Image: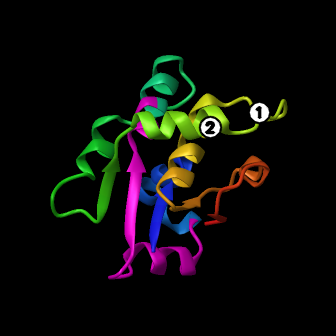
Amino acid sequence: MKFLLDTHVFLWVLAEPDRLAAETRRLLVGETNEVFVSIISFSEIVVKRRVGKLAADFDAPTAQLSPASKLQLLDLTPHHLSILDRLPFHERHRDPFDHLIIAQAISETMTLLTRDEHARLYPVQSLTP
């Protein structure tokens, strides 16, 4: 299976793995499973750091993408933006970072690991970590 980590889940994997359910931790290390983090998550981390909403160190997350890591980087492509453009807009959910990550998960047929209840508003397969 292929999993895409929402930004908060990525930060939990790095700094607070006990926040993840035991089953989620097993899925993330499963030998046949692939685990991705979006370049959008890195953008979100930087933006939220700059405005004072997040105290995470930017270098710590980027270090997790070493060749020895199971985490793989998912770049943003024009196809992802095409999927984003076709997603329904929900007035209750206005977070552009979430919209982009959801579009990527749909486009790449990945299961999104997120605690964001708004993910259910979109045609994305998701699991609560």
| Extreme-right residue of the structure | 91
Q: Which residues are magenta?
A: 20-43
In the figure, residue 79 lies in which quadrant? top left
Report the residue marked by disc 1: 89
Report the residue marked by disc 2: 99
Return the residue nearer the eye: 96 or 26: 96
Task: List x then y, in percent, for residue 112.
Answer: 57, 59
- Give the mark, 1 or 2, whose residue is nearer the N terminus: 1
Q: Kindly check if marks 1 and 2 are in contact, taking CB atoms under 8 A apart as contact.
A: no
Q: Residue at x 64, y 63 (%)?
A: 125
User: Around disc 2, counting alpha carbons within 10 Å, would you say few (fewer than 14), some (14 to 19), or many (20 or more)?
Assistant: many
Q: Residue at x 53, y 17 (%)?
A: 51
In the image, residue 90 lies in the stretch drawn in magenta: no
Q: Residue at x 40, y 51 (%)?
A: 37
Amino acid type assigned to the residue bearing label 2 in the image:
His
Q: Which quadrant of the figure contains the N terminus?
A: bottom left
Above or below — where is 57 with respect to 50? below
Task: List x then y, in percent, for residue 95.
Answer: 67, 31
Amino acid type assigned to the residue bearing label 1 in the image:
Phe
Return the residue nearer the eye: 79 or 63: 79
